[in-house]
Image: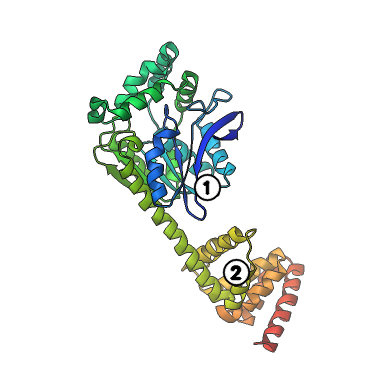
Amino acid sequence: MRFVRSGEATLHVEANLLRDRPTVVFVNPLGADLRIWDDVVAALARARLGALRYDLRGQGLSDLGATPIRLSDHVADLEAALASFGIARAAICGLSVGGMIALGLARKRPDLAAGLVLCCTAPRVGTAESWDSGIAAIERGGVGAIAEAVLQLWFSPAAYSENGPAVALCRNMLARTPADGYAATCAGLREADLEDAARAVAAPTLCLAGERDRATPPESVRALSAMIAGARFATIVGAGHMLCVEAPEALADHIVRFVDEIYACDESLFARGMAVRRRVLGDGHVDAAERNKTALDADFQRFIAEGAWGSVWSRPGLTLRERSMITIALLAALGHEGEVAMHARATRNTGATQGDVAEALLHVAVYAGVPAANRAFHTVKKTFEAMEEHP
């Protein structure tokens, strides 16, 4: 049994991670535990995708911790789970309240979210009155008092009427949810509004609805997708709110295709970055950097390839010559003489002339100070002399 500490709470977690493969992190709805994802995780394993899931605080086997709790506490728990397993970037899949937590993470820590799969969720769920009514019912009779009403919202009418094993097991799971944990999360959601977070999402996003969802109807999920730039929307036919229980294979298929796409984009970014890096710095420099790369700096080297060369240096707005001049000026202003020399050598590939470099350094003298420009002139003179001696 695995656990993670988050503040005053101990969270129950389960990790099925695969080396050098993407990870999908699952965030539960209210009243459920991590077992709801069993069939989805099994399908992802067949596609060689890793998975991390955990019980929300106050539910399943996780502690409640200090109260009151807010959505920000759940976001911090998700951060803690990722950090505990050293996961720097993952696809985050949240269902219902879990989707709101995923949106909260994307707002607070966009670097952690490679992509979002938002299932049967909305920026705001319920009203203050509906949450207060639910809390009062729980305080009177425990979660069991609202179990049937919740199950009718969780499952499609056909599945609920059939009352099969999945409904029966979810009834047991829901009824055994700690009343204080359920009520505390209800209270935390009463004021939660993630519309601004949704509009700020920059990560690739897939919004999924259950065709027969009575808790968060498809039109609500479609409205959420319209708030997120570039988000895609899809409906799983015949399914209710609990997509992972009622339609796990269909949900897993959507997730696998989405994750394959976003990580393929990452690989394209890396490949583009390496191509531009070689074009500017030369094969010899890049090959040497690759040979000297170790486990310690492998992620850093990838960050350079993607963040600098695959993104900024690959943009169409400036020529390589212009970017070369700007870069030398910035490095000179900051006093990074080794990097100034490296980019001075790269001018043989970018088309920037010695005259261009001199003009750039005159700007450094005016705006960053004569000493900085003086050091840079000394560095580039030595570099250009060496290039002439060894063309």
- How far is disc 2 from disc 1 in space, using C-alphas? 26 Å
* Residue 230 can be seen, yes or no: no
Residue where numbered disc 2 is placed: 290
Image location of residue 61, percent across then percent down: 51, 28
Q: Can you name the residue that lies furthest to the right here? A: 371
Left or right, 332 with respect to 96, comes to right
Name the residue: 58% across, 30% down. 10
Count of numbered labels shown in the rendering: 2
Image location of residue 93, percent across then percent down: 42, 42
Render colour scheme? rainbow
| Residue 212, quarter of the rendered image | top left
Q: Quadrant of the N terminus?
A: top right
Q: Amino acid at mark 2?
A: Glu
Image location of residue 154, percent across then percent down: 32, 29
Instruction: Name the foreground residue: 207 vs 244.
Output: 244
| Residue 345, quarter of the rendered image | bottom right
Pointer 1: residues within 10 angstroms few (<14), some, or many (20+)?
some
Q: Is residue 163 above or below residue 328?
A: above
The disc at residue 112 is: 1
Instruction: Name the foreground residue: 175 vs 207.
Output: 175
Q: Quadrant of the C terminus?
A: bottom right
Earlier in the chain: of badge 2 and badge 1, it is 1
Left or right, 232 with respect to 284, comes to left
Name the residue: 35% across, 44% down. 207
- Dot 1 lies on which element? helix
Q: Amino acid at mark 1?
A: Leu
